Amino acid sequence: MNWITRVRNSLSRIGKRETPDNLWIKCPSCREMLFAREYEDNLSVCPRCEHHGRIGAEARIVQLLDPGFMLLPAPRVREDPLLFRDSKRYPDRLKTARANYPFADALTHALGAIEGQKLVLGVQDFAFMGGSMGMAVGAAFVTGVEAAIRERCGYVICTAAGGARMQEGILSLMQMPKTTVALRRLKAAGLPYIVVLTDPTTGGVTASYAMLGDVQIAEPGALIGFAGQRVIQDTIREKLPEGFQRAEYLHAHGMVDMVVHRRDLRETLAQLLDYLRPAAKSA
Amino acid sequence: MTSYLEFEKPIAALDAQIRELQTTATDGGLDLSSEITKLQDKSARLLARTYSGLTPWQKTQVARHPQRPHFHDYVGAIFTGFVPLGGDRLYGEDAAIIGGLARLGNRRVMVIGHEKGHDTQSRIHHNFGMGKPEGYRKAVRLMELAGRFGLPVVTLVDTSGAFPGVEAEERGQAEAIARATEACLGLPVPMVATIVGEGGSGGAVALASAERVLMLEHAVYSVISPEGCASILWRTSEKAAEAAEAMKVTAQDLLRLNVIDRIVPEPMGGAHRDPLAAAAALGAALAEELDALSVYSPAALLQRREDRFLAIGAL
């Protein structure tokens, strides 16, 4: 099955409930047992402790966009140019990741609207190889931005990634300037760029497109940072401060504009897109 | 005196023998010159053979060699009239990232780079070349200044990575790196970046998003240190040599992948064996690159830079 078939198959599934009614899950934060269905209806936020669970690209797109959106095809890229192998071959890792995943790689785009405001929405999914940024993510990002420029609408991305995809070595690092080139073009076209930082967003993703938004939103409790906590701890050999690298901590340090509860995200984005309407084209 | 790396032990042994013979010759008034010359030839041949076949992990060690020339060594040898400019005007001065006005021949330029330091005291002062947000923000400030006055930007990249610390995170390390990358890509003047030692991850790319990227012959450039990659993918940092091999970190690999544009040859046995010769080669390469770029309009330079990064990884 190639990715196009998978996208097509997933399309019919999008919006449909898959969770059986009687399934219980445990909140990863407060350990409360929750009805899976209730949890899902609450946008995967724990009704008791407000922990924002990680959600996939499909769920996110359905949650945020008005019905009638269109998924954008994923661009093709060179696969495994380094012939990378650790304990497994990189193509085998990709194959495994794709076997349980509806899309081609970690970043998926949809063209649609939020309360009537047109936008291109990118969703990076931690479930696909830790959301890691490689050539496929970089190329998808460029495609998403190009679609926004073509459609003269805003570009919104929900980020989630452990960082760069190590199996692509330096080529993953090169996605930092590559995505930044795309953003320069979006800016030049007078279009807004809104970033929603979700749990977790770290490494090279944070150090490139995830921190260049015109408006920076973070989901409550999301881990957001450049360096990993273990690396920092090994460097400073001290206990990390309370709430370090969490959304609220970044907000207190002036690194994000706002921390927004998932239930208010649609409305916030709609409002921002309305304020930041594309600048009129100069004659 | 050169300090030898682990894989240079056989060369070290020969060199020790040579010194011993030299001492014996001087002390005893003996003529051992033919033996000494023979050994010197042997040592030179062994050095040449070793350095023509360095593995990626050995190159990583050469790139990190404590005696490898750093920013100040290159600036002192290549440029004249260096006027260092300090501070980001927001928080502080970061000694890990140095920049200022300088002349390369008769060309006025802005030179920016990481400085690792050369002894314990200076290494601590320069934070081992690991930049903090204020360093990257200073770089942005200097790039903007260069842009306004039409000064080409030359960067010398040499860092294991941006500083991973609490205060760096608090002050927005990720944002500072992202903005520095963006500043590189928006420069209306020529920009030539050279990886002179270690090009470590985002902390390197923030000063290396140029239309021409050079690498010294034994420099390395990677998304994560080989130790870091090994500890994540192999679950032990002891597999660093394998990780270095798999990641393709060498100048020779990166030229083939079109990630860099030119390799600057180093003196036999690495830049640390003859820092002045290394600097001379780099200076000549930089002069050539800047002259070649001087014909382009600001718009053409921006276009070249954008095309370069958009093309990486294209089918």
Image (cartoon, coloured by chain):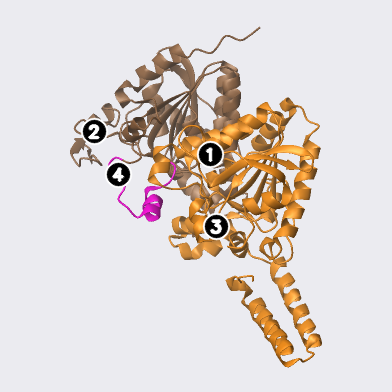
Chain colours: A brown, B orange
Q: CA distance from mark 3 to mark 4?
A: 37 Å
| Disc 3 to disc 2, C-alpha distance | 39 Å
Dot 3: chain letter: A
- Residue at image coords 49%, 19%: A119
Q: Are marks 4 and 2 in contact (CB under 8 Å)?
A: no
Query: What kind of residue is marked 1?
Result: Tyr
Mark number displayed over residue A85: 3
Examine the rendering and report whether any part of residue A137 can be seen.
no
Q: Chain of mark 1?
A: B
Q: CA distance from mark 1 to mark 2?
A: 39 Å
Please say if the residues under marks 4 and 1 sit with CB atoms less than 8 Å apart: no
Q: Are the residues at dot 1 and dot 2 in contact (C-beta closer than 8 Å)? A: no
Q: Based on the picture, tell me whether residue B100 belongs to the magenta stretch.
A: no
| Of residues B249 and B171, the one drawn nearer to the viewer in this rendering | B171
Q: Is residue B38 above or below residue B264?
A: below
Residue type highlighted by circle 4:
Pro
**Residue B136, label in figure:** 1
Quickly name the residue at label 4.
Answer: A241
In the picture, residue B69 is in which quadrant?
Answer: bottom right
Same chain for mark 4 and mark 2? The answer is yes
Would you say B169 lies left or right of B116 here?
A: left
Q: Do tags 3 and 4 sit on the same chain?
A: yes
* Range drawn in magenta: A226-243
Picture coordinates of residue A58 (x, y %)? 41, 30
Q: Nearer the viewer, mark 1 or mark 3?
A: 1
Badge 4 and badge 1 both on one subunit: no
Estimate the spatial distance between the alpha carbons at disc 4 and disc 1, rounded to whole Å. Answer: 24 Å
Cβ–Cβ below 8 Å for labels 1 and 3?
Answer: no
Distance between the Cα atoms at labels 1 and 3?
A: 34 Å
Q: Amino acid at mark 3?
A: Arg
Residue B268 in sight from this viewpoint: yes
